[in-house]
Amino acid sequence: MKTKRRTKIRFEKHELTLIRLSRNTRFFCPDCQTETAHLTIFQAAKALAVSEKDIFRLADTGQIHSIETEQGQLLICADSVSAFRPNTDLQEI
């Protein structure tokens, strides 16, 4: 009798998102009560692998912290992005 052999192949995917921040993106975050780095909507969307529309939703619901600059630009607190998705590594340059 012949025996059948089966080989199982399993693929795992690990992903780390790295966003380099410049020193001039630090603002006071009222939710964190400290000065933290802030991201643009585009950077936050890339870091969380979601759409920019989803970033606005997350900011509206308070799941991530945001501030609005005097020019009307919405900025997202990098610490809240890191807390929302732990595998996101945001480094300051």
Image (cartoon, rainbow, N blue to C red):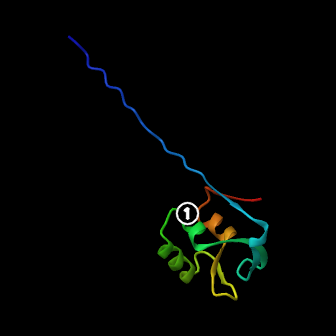
- Answer with the quarter of the image where residue 28 lies: bottom right
- Answer with the quarter of the image where residue 4 lies: top left
Q: Which is more toward the observer, 16 or 70? A: 70
Q: Which quarter of the image is occupied by the C terminus?
A: bottom right
Q: Is residue 83 left or right of residue 55?
A: right
Q: Is residue 11 above or below residue 63?
A: above
The residue under the point 25% across, 16% down is: 3
Q: Which is more toward the observer, 6 or 79? A: 79
The secondary element bearing badge 1 is classed as helix
Q: Which is more toward the observer, 4 or 49? A: 49
x and y percent of residue 17 in the render?
Answer: 60, 55
Give the residue type that dot 1 points to: Lys
On the image, numbered disc 1 is attached to which residue?
46
Task: Sort mark 1 into few (<14), some (14-19) or many (20+) by Cα contacts within 10 Å.
Answer: some
x and y percent of residue 65 in the render?
Answer: 64, 77
The residue under the point 50% across, 79% down is: 57
Q: Is residue 85 above or below residue 34?
A: above
The residue under the point 35% across, 26% down is: 7
Q: Is residue 92 above or below residue 36?
A: above
- Answer with the quarter of the image where residue 35 lies: bottom right
x and y percent of residue 62 in the render?
Answer: 59, 80
